Image (cartoon, rainbow, N blue to C red):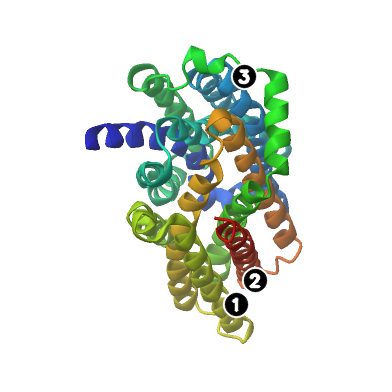
Amino acid sequence: MTSRFMRAALVLGLLSAIGPFAIDMYLPALPAIGKSLNASVGIVQVSLMAFFVSVGIAQLIYGPVSDMFGRKPPIYVGLCIFALGSIGCALAPNIETLIAFRFLQGAGACAGMVIPRAIVRDMHTGNDAARLMSLLMLVFSVSPILAPLTGSLVIQFASWRGIFWVVTAAALLGIVLITTSLAETRLPSQRLNSTVAYALAGYGLLLRDRHFLGVVFVGSFGIASFFAYLANSSFVLINHYGLTPAHYSLAFSVNAVSFIGASQFTGRLGARYGLKKVVRTAVVGYAATMVLLTALTLSGIDRLDVLMVMLIIGYGFLGLVVPSSAVLALDAHGAIAGTASALMGTLQFGTGAAVVAVIGLFVNGTSAPMVVGIAACAVLSMIFARVTLRERSSMH
């Protein structure tokens, strides 16, 4: 059982990490891309938002398709599209072309991001699913921990364009993995009722399910707060605090270790206290930490060490929220797990893109807009958790 868990977590985690690798690896390069293509901070951030928006939209297609035709075929298609988009980014002569190919890249990347969650639901429910989801995230952590470091090294030896050749190779590795190491979990007998009409009916059902939407937005605003960090941290830490791309990568990795390390306790804590209680408690800790960081920042304490310590603590709490909320959202929708996972991903990335866009309006070269945006997301996540999970608990 343990070896089966670990093998599934390894394969699904690596597939899930390919798309985020394309995000995290090029974060240290954002200032360099702006200089190389003569683009402003805001326009360079649009290349990140284009990826988020594309991932969000395309998930609505991949989820139902994976219910209809099985989990593996759409992953093959997605990885091929991702590879084409990556090659286009590597050859982009201007920022507009880069943005267009980042959009195409995102359309392919989301297959490996949404379908593994459905595969987890195919295999397990409840605390077992939480355990597998947290193990998947442990493997998935190779992206936020190693990708920025890898990106900073590639920049030194091959410029920012080399980053996109590396992720093209990662897509090819993903194709090899699913061919040799991933069994189909959506059997033909389970696909009989999966049609376009059934998918649309599934989306209608999910959009009327207040509990599903409430729990999804708990995770969506949690992830959006991390997107706010993704989009702004390189400019804040490199341009404002004066870190080198390599030092920035190390700082980014520390936060990722906190997030992933805490996520490994979700299965154990869920078994002991229940996943709902874990989420309700963790979001309060996360919101309190981020609100305190905002108060310190706005009072004039603009220090890198304070920012890093508070983010490490906060993202530790967030590491308990994200996998647990995903399991709670999908738990009651096994028959349409692909569709439910897709809608969840779309709402997460759509929320993240909106938050990044709003924060972009207030960018002023300091850490304040980023910190305020993160805190606002944390508070909204807490509100959704307290209302949704309390309401559900009173009914059962």
Image quarter of residue 316? bottom left
How far is disc 3 from disc 1 in space, using C-alphas? 47 Å
> Is there CB contact under 8 Å for labels 1 and 2?
yes
At horizontal 67% and vertical 32% (from top left) the residue drawn is: 60
Q: Amino acid at mark 1?
A: Thr
How far is disc 1 from disc 2 in space, using C-alphas? 6 Å
Relative side of 70 to 220, left or right: left
Residue 52 in the image: x percent, y percent? 64, 43
Mark 3 vs 1, N-terminal side: 3
Element under disc 1: helix
Residue at the disc numbered 2? 372
Residue 202 in the image: x percent, y percent? 67, 31
Q: Amino acid at mark 3?
A: Ser
Residue at the disc numbered 1? 294
Relative side of 80 to 352, left or right: left
Residue 67 in the image: x percent, y percent? 57, 22
